[in-house]
Image: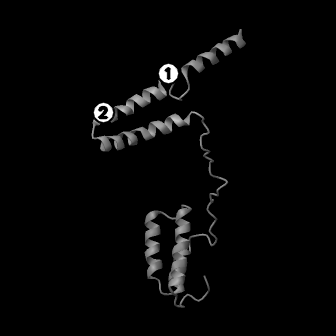
Amino acid sequence: MPEHPDIRIGNAERSEALDLLGEHFALGRLTLSEFDERSAKASAATTRGDLQVLFTDLPAHVTELPTTTRDDLPVIAPRKDPERWREVVMGLTPLVALVLFFTFDTWLFFLLIPAVGIVLFAGRDRDGHSTDDRGADSRRDEKKNA
């Protein structure tokens, strides 16, 4: 901050001081109570000297916070699973049952939900793989090891 401590300040200087205090707080240089106290004093400051006092024990240059860029974020690729249609159909089944219930005024359409689940996922493990395919894979592995 400039040298003349008795020069009056405006909202821009107060806002800049509050931002700088926030950066110091984010870097762990201030505790929550210190940050609250200094922020209140910065908001009430009328001269440059009032603001200078708040930063006497803090470094002049704030080290940049590590920023996260798009390249740093993990990539979540959509599953390209040919068997995904089963999950989509199962997810839409309750909606279809609800529409049919209101259309034909009978609760029997709600029995479609477990029935569709049984038809789509019977004979499959939790990952959606056919249990028959797993048996074939294990037989191939046994032949390779023999």
Q: Quadrant of residue 52?
A: bottom right
> Label 2's element?
helix
Q: Residue 142, image x and y in percent?
A: 67, 12
* Tags 1 and 2 touching, CB below 8 Å: no
Q: Residue 105, image x and y in percent?
A: 27, 41
Mark 2 belongs to which amino acid?
Answer: Leu
In the rendered structure, the answer to whether residue 87 lies left or right of residue 70 reads left
Q: Which residue is mark 1?
A: 123
Which residue in the rendered view is the most extreme toward the top?
Answer: 146
Name above or below for residue 133 compared with residue 56: above
Q: Residue 56, image x and y in percent?
A: 56, 74
> Label 1's element?
loop
In the rendered structure, the answer to whether residue 140 lies left or right of residue 28 reads right
Pick whichever, 59 or 68, lies toward us. 68
- In whole angstroms, how far apart are the C-alphas of marks 1 and 2? 25 Å
Using a 10 Å C-alpha cutoff, classify the residue at mark 1 as few (fewer than 14 neighbours), some (14 to 19) or many (20 or more). Answer: few
Of callouts 1 and 2, the N-terminal one: 2
Nearer the viewer's eye, disc 1 or disc 2?
2
The C terminus lies in quadrant: top right
Q: Which residue is mark 2?
A: 108
The N terminus lies in quadrant: bottom right
Name above or below for residue 142 compared with residue 52: above
Using a 10 Å C-alpha cutoff, classify the residue at mark 2 as few (fewer than 14 neighbours), some (14 to 19) or many (20 or more). Answer: few
Mark 1 belongs to which amino acid?
Answer: Gly
Q: Residue at x 54, y 91 (%)?
A: 7
Q: Quadrant of residue 140?
A: top right
